Image (spheres, rainbow, N blue to C red):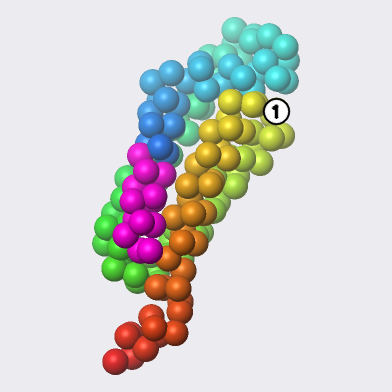
C-alpha cells in the first residue's frame, strides 16, 4: 500500500506543480474565473494587481510542492510518522483552503482543480495509514 500511496502522492505533487506553474506563467487564466464570478467583467486595474498576486501565490505553491517531494522521498516512503503528519498539515491546509476560496468565489474551474488535488491527496495519505499507525508499525519501531 505504501508504494501505491507514494505513486499517488507523486502524481498529486506533479499536479500541484503544474497548477503552480500555471499561476506563474498564465495568471490571467487563473484569476479570470474568480473576477468574472464576482464582477461580471474584468476591470483593467484589478487584473494587473491580481495577476501579480496570482504569480506570487504560484511561487509559494511551487516551493511548497518542491518541499513536498523532499518530505515524500526522505520520510514518507520509509513510513516515518513525521512525514505523514507533514503531509496532513501542509497538504490539508493547502488543498482545503484552496477549495474553500474557490467555492466562496464561485470559480468553477478552481473548484474542479482543487477537488481533484484533494482527492489525490486524501487517497495518497489514507491508503497506507496502517503502515504508519497500525500495530505492525508500532512493533517494528520498538523491535
Q: Nearer the viewer, residue 60 or 133?
A: 133
Residue 128 picture quarter: bottom left
Magenta span main SS: helix
Q: Which residues are magenta?
A: 1-14
Quadrant holding the C terminus: bottom left
- Residue 139 against residue 1 in the figure, above or below: below
- Residue 95 against residue 113 in the figure, above or below: below
On the question of residue 94 being in view, the answer is no
Residue 16 in picture, x, y percent from top left: 42, 39
Quadrant holding the N terminus: bottom left
Q: Which residue is mark 1?
A: 106
- Residue 94 against residue 27 in the figure, above or below: below
Residue 92: within the magenta? no
Farthest residue toward the left? 74
Residue 14 in picture, x, y percent from top left: 35, 39
Query: Residue at horizontal 46%, vertical 61%?
Result: 127
Is 110 left or right of 69, judged from the image as shown?
Answer: right
Q: Residues within 10 Å of mark 1 (few under 14, many from 20)?
A: some
Residue 20 in picture, x, y percent from top left: 42, 33
Q: Nearer the viewer, residue 105 or 8?
A: 8
Q: Nearer the viewer, residue 112 or 20?
A: 112
Query: Residue at horizontal 44%, vertical 55%?
Result: 124
Q: Find numbered disc 1 in the image and state the secondary structure of the residue it sits on.
A: loop
Farthest residue toward the bottom? 143
Residue 137 in picture, x, y percent from top left: 38, 80
On the question of residue 81 being in view, the answer is yes
Amino acid at each position: 500500500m505504501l508504494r501505491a500511496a507514494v505513486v499517488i502522492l507523486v502524481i498529486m505533487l506533479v499536479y500541484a506543480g503544474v497548477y503552480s506553474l500555471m499561476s506563474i506563467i498564465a495568471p490571467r487564466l487563473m484569476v479570470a474565473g474568480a473576477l468574472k464570478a464576482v464582477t461580471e467583467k474584468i476591470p483593467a486595474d484589478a487584473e494587473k494587481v491580481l495577476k501579480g498576486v496570482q504569480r506570487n501565490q504560484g511561487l509559494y505553491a511551487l516551493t511548497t510542492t518542491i518541499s513536498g517531494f523532499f518530505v515524500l522521498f526522505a520520510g514518507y516512503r520509509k513510513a516515518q510518522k513525521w512525514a505523514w503528519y507533514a503531509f496532513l498539515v501542509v497538504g490539508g491546509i493547502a488543498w482545503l483552503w484552496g477549495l474553500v476560496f474557490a467555492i466562496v468565489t464561485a470559480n468553477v474551474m478552481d473548484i474542479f482543480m482543487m477537488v481533484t488535488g484533494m482527492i489525490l491527496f486524501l487517497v495518497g495519505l489514507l491508503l497506507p495509514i496502517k503502515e504508519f499507525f497500525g500495530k505492525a508499525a508500532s512493533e517494528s519501531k520498538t523491535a
